[in-house]
Amino acid sequence: MAEIDTTLTNVTYRYFLTDLVSNSVIGEVPFTGVSYERVLKKAGAFSGTIPVIEATEKLNIYEATMPGRTGIYVMRNDVCVWGGIIWARKYTESSKSLAVDASEFTSYFYHRHVWQTLIYGSEYIGISSFSITNGVATVVTEIPHGFKQNNFVKITFTNPTVDGTHQVQGVSGANIFSFIVESGNVISTPISSGAVRRLIDTYDFVRDLIFQLNTDISVRTEARQDLFANDVIEPGISIESAVISKQRENGLITLRTLQDHQLVPGQEFESYELGSGLDGIHTVTAVPNAKTINYELSGVNISETPLSGIRTLYVTNKTLTNNVATITTHQPHGAIIGQTVVLTGVDSFFSERLDENFNGRQVITAVTTNTVTYVLTPPDGRFLPEIPTTTVSGGLATFGSKVIYGSYGPYTANSNLGIEVGTNKTSGLYQDTQILRGFELKTYGEILEDYANNLNGFEYRIDCDYEFTTASFTRTLTLLNIENPKEITNNVDVSDEERLGYNELIFEYPGNISTFTVEENAENSATRFFVEGDITDLSDEASQPYSVAADIYSLDNKLGKSWPLIDQVENINNSADEYVLYQYALEYLYESKPPMGDFSVTINGSLNPVVGTYYPGDWCSLIINDPFVLARLESDQEPRKDIIVRKINSFKVSVPDGPSFPETVDVELITDWKVDKVGQELGLTRPAVGEN
């Protein structure tokens, strides 16, 4: 039987509000009618009511509960059991009460969008040849591959002996890498159709994605060096502000602008033609007024020095010889070698010759009083058609000291809610290259959902805690390996109890389970599962790829309880590989074993295990002494004859007002036959790690 919590008579709930950006505590407020829920891969809800009376007037309830700007934490006996964001509130005059609705911090992911194009993994690289010597495969690529030792790569259309997912063991050249295979020797063999690409560890992907969230995809971060940033197509406009003076005092730069700027603290900008080594990409640290910018850059002090600001001159002539361009301005420009000039309207569009070479930001290589020279180097290195000295009409050349920033940010001071990623190093599960296209403006929540639900996916939640030493709350994105939640890394066989840990969390009836229901439903079950692919380039008349997997155990039950064919179909977009589609069919088939038995239990939250000692994603044991449940255990619908094993997907806690505890906890439990494999012999082989 479950033991009573010895602290039952002392259970205390407290509710703290914080500033969402700084995470500083605003204060403690009294709530009544509280309920809160924890959910796996989603955002659990919170609701509660604050009396707006004389006793709470000093708490400044209006500002303290501002939706979209306020964090809220729930403490049970000084243990943080819930944390999230206030998104809505409703004041009722008749009852003088304020109803507050909040969602777990995971909800923030759905309020932020990826606005730059990011690529994780690599594009396919052509393979020139491969060979195998004493169990080591050596692959030569057509261009430098950029792989490192221990990277995981996927090879396709080369040869069955080397196709698939492999871990790089050695890199002996820019175009050469090797890995271990179980195959006989193969002499060097030229390949024309083969390709290889680097895969990404699921945890590494999430770690960097949250880093981009916290920094608003800052261009100054080291993590961006391995990513592609679409700097050509910007999600807005670039804004220029003329700088008329500069100063440095003890590492603090002060710039003064001619007109009011639109920068805010934490925003990135780029400075031009300031001199003294002050140019480059920086982050605003303070905005003393609408015409002043501060940022930090160490160096010798510089007294306040006037600068030219932005000067725009007309371009009267242009010429291009051997990729060297020269433009002439209508009056002396005052620029020097090494500075930049921005040209607009200089290219020709309405003459016999269409040239698109002059416009843009150019670095000056030579000057005279009224001319500026710079070098044009096309990406392919070719020589551009020569253009004799030609009169320009409507061309402009912009010089001078200025700062340039985007209407999109990045706004680094407002993007970081302090959500950290757990300490898991790697998942050991690899997925294919991910291209996040900025113009699609997907939310981080959508991306995480899609990625987690992919083959070799994972589960996640945000856990909150209170650090007494620093008197502050923390938020940690916890990543869970679906098939190995305890993350046992040794290679020896382990029991399900060790791997899943369900023996550590036990709910009993009679005992800490107050009530329960069992729902068995075959409406959405399947003994055969079809998965359709999607090749977007095919016409409507062409056949799309598809694949199927069948539950052999259910179709040929050795106890004489065979099931009929029950078909289900799902579609996987942008997938043409029938083996990948087969893996998806296996995945869905495991989730659809008939009839699906769903257990819902209501628990006394103050009996062990008490609220705050279990989480979404934990596995648990149900010991239920009831004739219907015992009959299910005696059938072949459960892998065990003594206990029900399930995973906690979510739970909702209802907190009674006043001292009349215990809490009521409604727990949603889910089956996961692909993970809890005991007795579930589908007669099929699970996909190998990384093969997707």
Image: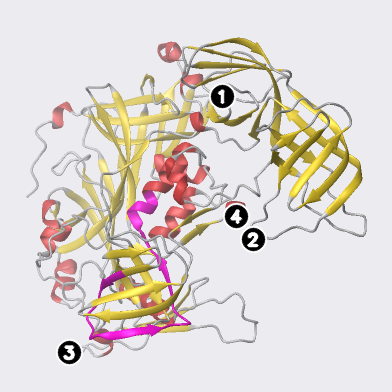
Residue 156 position in % (x across, y down): 41, 77
Residue at image x 81%, y 35%? 371
Residue 197 within the magenta-colored segment of the rendering: yes
C-alpha span from label 1 to label 4: 36 Å
Give the mark nearest the N terminus, 4 or 3.
Answer: 4
Give the mark nearest the N terminus, 4 or 2.
Answer: 2
Secondary structure under tag 2 reads: loop
Number of residues whose C-alpha sits closer than 10 Å to that of mark 3, classed few (under 14), some (14–19) or many (20 or more): few
Of tags 1 and 3, the one toward the viewer is 1
Residue 668 position in % (x across, y down): 30, 55
Residue 488 position in % (x across, y down): 15, 57
Q: Nearer the viewer, residue 457 or 462?
A: 457
Residue 634 position in % (x across, y down): 13, 75
Number of residues whose C-alpha sits closer than 10 Å to that of mark 4, classed few (under 14), some (14–19) or many (20 or more): few
Numbered label attached to residue 278: 1
Left/right placement of residue 294 relative to residue 200 reads: right
C-alpha span from label 2 to label 1: 33 Å
Residue 349 visible, this orientation: yes
Number of residues whose C-alpha sits closer than 10 Å to that of mark 1, classed few (under 14), some (14–19) or many (20 or more): many
Secondary structure under tag 3 reads: loop
- Disc 2 designates what residue? 380
